[in-house]
Image (tube, rainbow, N blue to C red):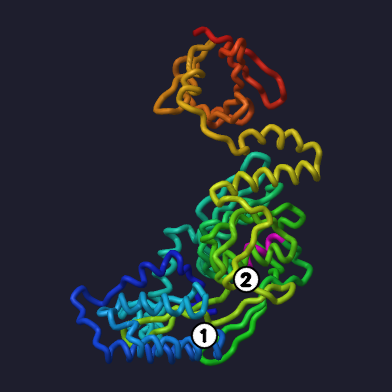
């Protein structure tokens, strides 16, 4: 869909709502406010996905105007905020937003010129490149679990190379975690590309089914698993999607569809509940309306999650979701292959929730041990050996200490008679070594 950015209301609306044409704009008159409300109503009725509901909402805005609800809105940003609040209240649809941006309105008309349209596209490409097309982090977690941190779904026409590189990066993982906790949406076509890696390419599988309004006509589309990809497929490998209350729009659809198809386990918090595709439409010469123009339906029972959000399979605070998903992935891999049980057992202490140690408890650990020492610096433990190598220590609970950047061994505090007597090194293969405490 050309120029159908399924943009993030939760991130972008604040900037839109405070944009003004000039610092010294004239106050709005009653006639100005009425003209805006009337124009907004017509734009709403022409574009909103639910025509009957659009008429009701437009009538509610006119009623509010006649009741004097907007009399205190003396400038354009204030009126835009009032109208946005009323649109959301009347529809329970978080995609709605009214903003003030006369430059955008003028530019919207100018985009009919091919040269201007090309310049705008180049600007979008530069902006996306500065954000690496939404791919904020790619790495492998312990246990050979690939991790993808995705801040938004970029237009794949612009971000295809970045997506291809990310897909190739994760193709050797035994499992994959997609982090969409803070992803506010974007282009469903990018979601289609990434999701296609999780399914076979020789079998028809629909991912999304939807319709939308395009210049007064209804367009119906279905998006399916792509038959050709720039990377190996991850069929049969466990998939986990992290969700949060700020997961929105296309991010929610990615999670919802994979859950419906039984292809992913969702971990985190219920999502925001913005299921409808949106577009930006000019209202007069100064205002614009962000309006839901279509409806997406899942490929199983043709439902959606508008206003309700997507419920995770494993509820967890968003801040803890990655650790929870990591534990689940390790457990699922161990269940499928008992040889991987050792990895799950070894990593369990690092991924478990644990309360912080008190300053007194940390101070008790500090001291000199054979060939090494532990200091308490700025409230954190620091491990030093050979008087030149220094790494941070992290308490894991149960007297275990993880060493910064070290994966093949950890320490355990040895106590005798209630006092710390030694530092025990525990290697991943189960061998141990004791370093007596000197003082």
Where is residue 11, by image quadrant? Answer: bottom left
Against 320, residue 58 (above or below) is below
Q: Position of residue 130 (x, y in %)?
A: 42, 59
Q: Which residues are magenta?
A: 192-198
Residue 344 in the image, given as x and y percentages of width and height: 71, 37
Q: Position of residue 37 (x, y in %)?
A: 37, 88
Judging from the image, what secondary structure is the residue with disc 2 in? loop
Residue 68's mark? none
Q: Is residue 425 left or right of residue 288?
A: right
- Compared across the picture, whether 113 is left or right of 184 comes to left
Q: Is residue 362 above or below residue 122?
A: above
Disc 2 crowd rating (10 Å Cα; few below 14, some 14-19, many 20+) is many
Q: Which residue is mark 1?
A: 48
The reply, left or right, for residue 29 in relation to residue 7 is left
**Which residue is nearer to you in this view: 318 or 239?**
318
Q: Quadrant of the N terminus?
A: bottom right
Pick the residue in front: 14 or 372: 14
As for residue 197 lying within the magenta part, the answer is yes
- Judged from the image, the secondary structure of the residue bearing numbered disc 1 is loop
Q: Residue at x 50, y 72 (%)?
A: 94
Q: Is residue 129 above or below residue 249?
A: above
In the rendered image, the vertical position of residue 114 relative to residue 335, given as above or below: below
Considering every residue shown, the one lying at the far left of the view is: 24
Say which residue appears at 50% left-offset and 53% top-offset.
136
What is the C-alpha distance between the residues marked 1 and 2?
Answer: 18 Å
Please tell me how crowded label 1 is: few (under 14), some (14-19), or many (20+) other residues with Cα within 10 Å: many
Q: Quadrant of residue 277?
A: bottom right
Query: Mark 2 or mark 1, which is nearer the start of the sequence?
Result: 1
Q: What residue did someone put label 2 on?
A: 305
State whether the magenta stretch is mostly helix, strand or loop. helix
- The percent coordinates of residue 276 (x first, y second) are 56, 76
Q: Quadrant of residue 251?
A: bottom right
């Amino acid at each position: 869909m050309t120029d159908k950015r399924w943009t993030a209301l939760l991130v972008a609306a604040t900037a839109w709502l405070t944009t003004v044409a000039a610092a010294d704009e004239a106050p709005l008159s009653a006639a100005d406010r009425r003209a805006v409300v009337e124009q907004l109503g017509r734009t709403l009725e022409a574009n909103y996905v639910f025509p009957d509901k659009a008429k009701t909402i437009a009538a509610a805005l006119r009623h509010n105007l006649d009741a004097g609800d907007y009399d205190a809105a003396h400038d354009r940003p204030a009126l835009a905020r009032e109208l946005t609040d009323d649109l959301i209240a009347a529809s329970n649809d978080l995609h709605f937003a009214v903003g003030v941006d006369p430059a955008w309105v003028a530019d919207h008309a100018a985009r009919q010129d091919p040269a201007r349209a090309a310049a705008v596209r180049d600007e979008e490409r530069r902006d996306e490149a500065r954000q690496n097309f939404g791919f904020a982090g790619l790495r492998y977690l312990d246990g050979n679990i690939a991790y993808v941190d995705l801040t938004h779904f970029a237009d794949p026409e612009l971000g295809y190379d970045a997506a291809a590189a990310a897909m190739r990066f994760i193709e050797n993982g035994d499992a994959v975690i997609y982090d969409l906790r803070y992803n506010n949406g974007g282009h469903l076509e990018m979601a289609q590309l990434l999701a296609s890696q999780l399914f076979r390419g020789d079998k028809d599988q629909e991912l999304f089914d939807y319709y939308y309004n395009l210049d007064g006509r209804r367009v119906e589309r279905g998006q399916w698993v792509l038959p050709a990809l720039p990377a190996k497929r991850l069929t049969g490998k466990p998939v986990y999607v992290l969700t949060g209350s700020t997961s929105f729009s296309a991010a929610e659809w990615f999670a919802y569809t994979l859950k419906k198809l039984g292809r992913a386990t969702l971990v985190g918090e219920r999502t925001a509940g913005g299921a409808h595709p949106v577009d930006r439409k000019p209202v007069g010469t100064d205002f614009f309306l962000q309006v839901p123009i279509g409806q997406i339906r899942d490929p199983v029972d043709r439902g959606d999650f508008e206003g309700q959000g997507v419920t995770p399979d494993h509820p967890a605070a968003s801040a803890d979701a990655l650790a929870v998903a990591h534990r689940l992935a390790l457990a699922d891999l161990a269940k499928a292959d008992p040889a991987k049980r050792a990895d799950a057992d070894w990593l369990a202490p690092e991924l478990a929730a644990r309360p912080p140690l008190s300053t007194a408890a940390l101070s008790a650990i500090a001291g000199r041990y054979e060939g090494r020492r532990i200091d308490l610096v700025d409230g954190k433990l620091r491990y030093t050996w050979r008087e030149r190598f220094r790494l941070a220590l992290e308490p894991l609970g149960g007297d275990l200490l993880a060493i910064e950047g070290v994966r093949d061994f950890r320490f355990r505090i040895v106590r005798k008679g209630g006092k710390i007597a030694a530092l025990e090194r525990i290697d991943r293969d189960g061998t141990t070594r004791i370093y007596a405490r000197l003082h």
